[in-house]
Image (cartoon, grey):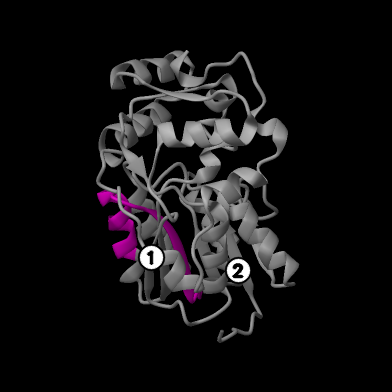
Amino acid sequence: MTAIDQPADILVLGATGKTGRLIVNALQSRNIPVRPGSRDAERPFSWQDRDGWDHALQGVRSVYIAYAPDLAVPGAPDDIAAFTDRARKAGVEQLVLLSGRGDPEAQASETIIRQSGLRWTVIRSSWFFQNFDQGAFQPMVAAGELALPVGQTSEPFIDIRDIADIAVAALTGTEHDGQLYEVTGRQLLSFADIAALITERTGRPVRHVDIPHQAFIDGARAAGLPQDHVWLLDYLFSTVLDGRNARVMDGVERALGRPPRSFAAYAASVPADAWAATPAAGLAS
């Protein structure tokens, strides 16, 4: 690997999120200067507060961009374009973007990054394994029922540790410059497959129940989710998870020279209490 001298900070946006936490920890463990970017950081960062962006970017060489809540939401490309312009003016040299597969809005943001005139790497990712123990699906797993409007659609879910490994490599070297890595896990899995694998891992029955799309959205509203989150769920489950991404890609192998982690390896790493039984039934209650 061609290492880069690091006189300035690497800014990690979404530093308290799933991938951001891992990237910050990995860089800190290597004594590489890193600046966490979040609302609660020493230099706060929020996508809703553009006035604070310049302070967060001061002295930064490279930026890892994980956009919240999702690059699919209306206005995301405008934010990415405005941020890229601020970053360029601040002297930033490199951008590493976490993007999503099968999502035209996310690909619009990718184009902005690729045409920025800065060094860039795009990590276009499938859905995360960790959504089942750290994210929206965890309460359903704990309740024993993945009640989702997905039918038999399969997804090549990926471990966020693979994404973090690629991001760290890109942020600390030059050989990933100008690369778009479409990253997936090693196999296609339906939600019924996931339920069976979690059952095998925990010894506690978990099943997938296919429910009508509108019932799922109504359940999200009844659970008190904000309207923008409800919109995102509606979009993701009606559009992105329609089978368009049901293929395995080689991005992890291309970037890291090794296969992606398996679901079994992920499940073995999940703390025993993460999937403990609970009376909660998630969004479908």
Query: Does the stretch in magenta take in 111?
Result: yes
- Circle 2 sits in a helix, a strand or a loop, which is it? strand
Alpha carbon distance from label 2 to label 1: 27 Å
Q: Position of residue 168 (x, y in %)?
A: 58, 68
Given residues 241 and 193, the one toward you in this image is 193
The answer to whether any part of residue 119 appears in the image is yes
Instruction: Please identify the quarter of the rendering in which residue 1 is found.
Output: bottom right
Kind of residue at disc 1? Asp
The answer to whether any part of residue 89 appears in the image is no
The disc at residue 250 is 1
Neighbor class of circle 1 (other Cα within 10 Å; few <14, some 14-19, many 20+) is some
Given residues 197 and 157, the one toward you in this image is 197
Q: Residue at x 65, y 60 (%)?
A: 24
Query: Does the stretch in magenta take in 165?
Result: no
Q: Position of residue 153 (x, y in %)?
A: 31, 37
Q: Position of residue 206 (x, y in %)?
A: 53, 25
Q: How many marks?
A: 2
Q: Considering only vertical position in the picture, is 48 above or below 277?
A: below
Kind of residue at disc 2? Ile
- Circle 1 sits in a helix, a strand or a loop, which is it? loop
Neighbor class of circle 2 (other Cα within 10 Å; few <14, some 14-19, many 20+) is many
Instruction: Please identify the quarter of the rendering in which residue 280 is found.
Output: top right
Instruction: Please identify the quarter of the rendering in which residue 220 is found.
Output: top left
Given residues 219 and 71, the one toward you in this image is 219
Q: Considering only vertical position in the picture, is 243 above or below 174?
A: above
Given residues 94 and 158, the one toward you in this image is 158
- Residues at circles 2 and 1 in contact by the CB criterion of under 8 Å: no
Q: In this figure, which residue is indicated by the disc labeled 2?
A: 10
User: Residues in magenta?
Assistant: 88-112
Whichever of labels 2 and 1 marks the residue nearer the N terminus, that label is 2
Q: Considering only vertical position in the picture, is 268 above or below 148?
A: below
Task: Single out the mark in the foreground, 2 or 1.
Answer: 1
